[in-house]
Image (cartoon, rainbow, N blue to C red):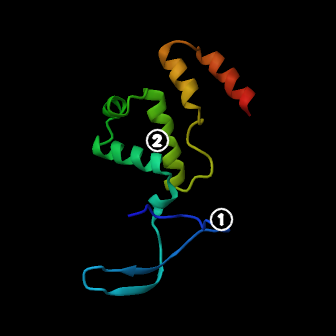
Amino acid sequence: MNKRLKQCPVCNSNLEIVEYHCPNCDTSIKGRFGVGDFAALTAPQQEFVKTFVCCQGNIKEVEKILKISYPTVKNKLSEVTSILCGRREPVAIIMSDDILEDIDKGNLTVEEALTKLRERR
């Protein structure tokens, strides 16, 4: 089964669910149905949330499973929090994964990272 589409492939407008169908008893239900808050997340963000919940919020466990650094976990958590909680501005500065990984590996100082972020604006 295909993943649920969010936007029309022709005009890029948001799609809405208007029918549910049971293949077992052939019942169809028509109407306008919401897609839920999690539909606003991208597939990678949904996978992150799933991992985070399965780890019961243990960031160290999320780091191990996803093989990412602590700052990257916090960054991804900030992204999904801002989407799910309706904040227009992210809770924390959204940094690129490459910058976070370089800091984590010791290849980049915090000052150098800040300079790179300012240049990207």
Q: Is residue 19 above or below residue 45?
A: below
Residue found at x 51% / y 64% = 5
Coordinates of residue 118 in the picture (x, y in percent): 72, 27
Q: Amino acid type of disc 1?
A: Asn
Residue found at x 54% / y 49% = 82
Q: Nearer the viewer's eye, disc 1 or disc 2?
A: 1
Task: Report crowding for label 2: few under 14, some 14 to 19, many 20 or more residues within 10 A (C-alpha).
Answer: some
Secondary structure under tag 1 reads: loop
Coordinates of residue 57 in the picture (x, y in percent): 33, 41
Q: Is residue 72 above or below residue 26?
A: above
Residue at label 2?
Answer: 77
Q: What number is the disc on residue 71? A: none
In-image side of 2 versus 6 (left or right)? left
Task: Report crowding for label 1: few under 14, some 14 to 19, many 20 or more residues within 10 A (C-alpha).
Answer: few
Residue found at x 61% / y 65% = 9
The image quadrant of residue 68 is top left
Q: Quadrant of the C terminus?
A: top right
Q: Is residue 72 above or below residue 12?
A: above
Q: Nearer the viewer, residue 96 or 82?
A: 96
Q: Quadrant of the N terminus?
A: bottom left
Q: Amino acid type of disc 2?
A: Leu
Q: Nearer the viewer, residue 23 or 89?
A: 23
Q: Are marks 1 and 2 in contact (CB under 8 Å)?
A: no
Secondary structure under tag 2 reads: helix
Coordinates of residue 6 in the picture (x, y in percent): 54, 64
Residue at label 1?
Answer: 12
- Measure the C-alpha gap from mark 1 to mark 2: 28 Å
Q: Nearer the viewer, residue 77 or 13?
A: 13
Coordinates of residue 93 in the picture (x, y in percent): 60, 35
Q: Nearer the viewer, residue 9 or 18?
A: 9
In-image side of 86 versus 53 (left or right)? right
